[in-house]
Amino acid sequence: MNPRLAAAFDLLPEYLGWHVLLSLSALVLGLVISLPLAVTAARSPRLRWPVLALASLIQTIPSLALLALFYPLLLALSALSLATLGMGFSALGFLPSLLALTLYSILPILRNGVTGITGVDPAISEAADGVGMTSRQKLFQVELPLAAPVIMAGVRTAAVWTIGAATLSTPVGQTSLGNYIFAGLQTENWVFVLFGCAASALLAMAADQLLGLVETGARTRRKGLVIVGLAGIVIGAGAALAPLATFGQHAAYTVGAKNFSEQYILAELMASRLERAGAVVSRKEDLGSAVAYRALAAGEIDVYVDYSGTLWTNVLGRTDNPGRKAVLDQLTTELKRRDGVLVLGSLGFENAYAFVMRPDRAQALGVASLADLSREAPRLKLGSDLEFLSRPEWKAVDTAYAFTFRSERAYQPTFMYRALAAGDADVISAFSSDGRIAADKLVVLTDPKGAIPPYDAVILISPKAAADPRLIAALRPLVGAIPVEAMRAANYSVDRDKGKSTPAEAARALEQAIAAN
């Protein structure tokens, strides 16, 4: 079997189990909320429009945005709960995903519920009133049974939507089938991407067909079909959830990572060192920059690697550039004072933003610096990663050089390099430790005004783990131990088109290179 396909199957029990648990929980919670609302809205024309309008409004919010918005809200509520009640709760992963997906499941169930109940033949309702049925009896013995097929159609739609949207829960720290897709897109592991898409689609189709049996049984009054459909759902969910019991051992440490190759490699490097020290380690990957730091400060993850320039601008809100050493020293002091976060030290290399061009294009235009680029910008197309154009670093560079590009477009990092190669972008905001810069012989433009801050890769440790001797002992040997050349080689081994390594393989090779030095 193909090694990547074998790796995908190895991860399937955990990813599928969490995906089913999240989707099923959201769907059940959506039913619990939607059905009473549907009954209330069906019986009260005054409430019907605002209730349906609000549900429709929620549906217009992009699912990824809704997932991301719940994290800071829950984090603030957890902090408030801790301050007032002495106990908080986890704001990362399952809870924000559950709440967002529950909201997404409401509209189809609610709308179909209202339609089904209001669509009951008035003559039947009058007959129920005529035989002296109470409102409750009429609801449960007449209206809901007659509306059941329409309601089940809404449940089927909600199930498919929820299972599909659950793949987007990965950036807020929830394991799901989306882990295949996010990691696969970044490392160009198309086996993972296709595997994740196929698994999600098959799960949605299976759920839809089983719920379809329940719907058919409700419509034709055939209880056997209803029982078969419900039994299939229970058995299937039980089989998917059973493997999660083997993941029940409490992890001593949680290692975080953002959503690009270098982060995957460094997370594997740190996790492997902790595991060799006898610790049980879990991983939270594909986190956004803001989510990763907030999760660390709140103790949701114990350690991850970030970059001094990102912390300087995004966390501390600084716009000045006092130099590489001063930035690192002040970060170490301020993060400890403000958030209790320990900066263990720099790994020994920078991964700075670097504007790069193809050598033929740079030579033809006479561009060697950002000042030269500013002169040519009106006829050039800029490509960036998904975050850069909204970050303070871009605003600082744009202000310093007064860029007026012909167009600015954000790409997933892997496709950003492909856009440059294909001519869809003339210049991109690359990363200085990326092996593709040297492999593709790209020209790195100088920054004569020093607008781009330093970006030392630093190990950050959460307040609750800052004094943990086992964690410190396992990770301190990495401080100052990774030269940029070794990191570039490790990154390129994962990113290159042929003979790709997995992040775990690249981490092992990187550790061997560290030991050799």
Image: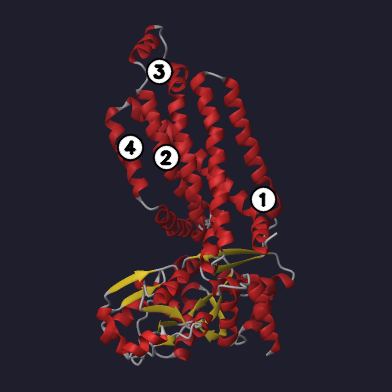
Q: CA distance from mark 3 to mark 4?
A: 23 Å
Callout 3 amino acid: Ser
- Front residue of 515/354: it is 354
Asked if the residues shown at circle 4 and circle 2 are in contact, with their CB atoms under 8 angstroms apart, the answer is no
Residue under label 3: 135
For the residues bearing labels 3 and 4, Cβ distance under 8 angstroms: no
Cα distance between the residues tagged 3 and 2: 24 Å
The answer to whether marks 1 and 2 mark residues whose Cβ atoms lie closer than 8 Å is no
Q: Residue beneath label 2, please?
A: 106
N-terminal of the two: label 1 or label 4? 4
Q: Specify the amino acid type for callout 2.
A: Ile
In this picture, residue 476 sits left or right of residue 25: right
> Where does the N terminus fall, quadrant-wise?
bottom right
Q: Residue 449: give x, y in percent of width and height.
A: 33, 91
Q: Is residue 258 visible?
A: no
Task: Give the quarter of the figure containing the C terminus.
Answer: bottom right
Q: Earlier in the sequence, mark 3 or mark 2?
A: 2
Whole-percent x and y of residue 348? 57, 87
Q: Residue at x 63, y 36 (%)?
A: 234
Instruction: Give the distance between the C-alpha atoms of the residues marked 1 and 3, in whole angstroms.
Output: 44 Å
Question: In front: mark 3 or mark 2?
Answer: 2
Q: Residue at x 53, y 45 (%)?
A: 23
Q: Which mark is residue 52?
A: 4
Residue closer to the observer: 497 or 233: 497
Hey, which quadrant is residue 445 in on the image? bottom left
Element carrying mark 2 = helix
- Residue 244, disc: 1
Determine the secondary structure under disc 1: helix
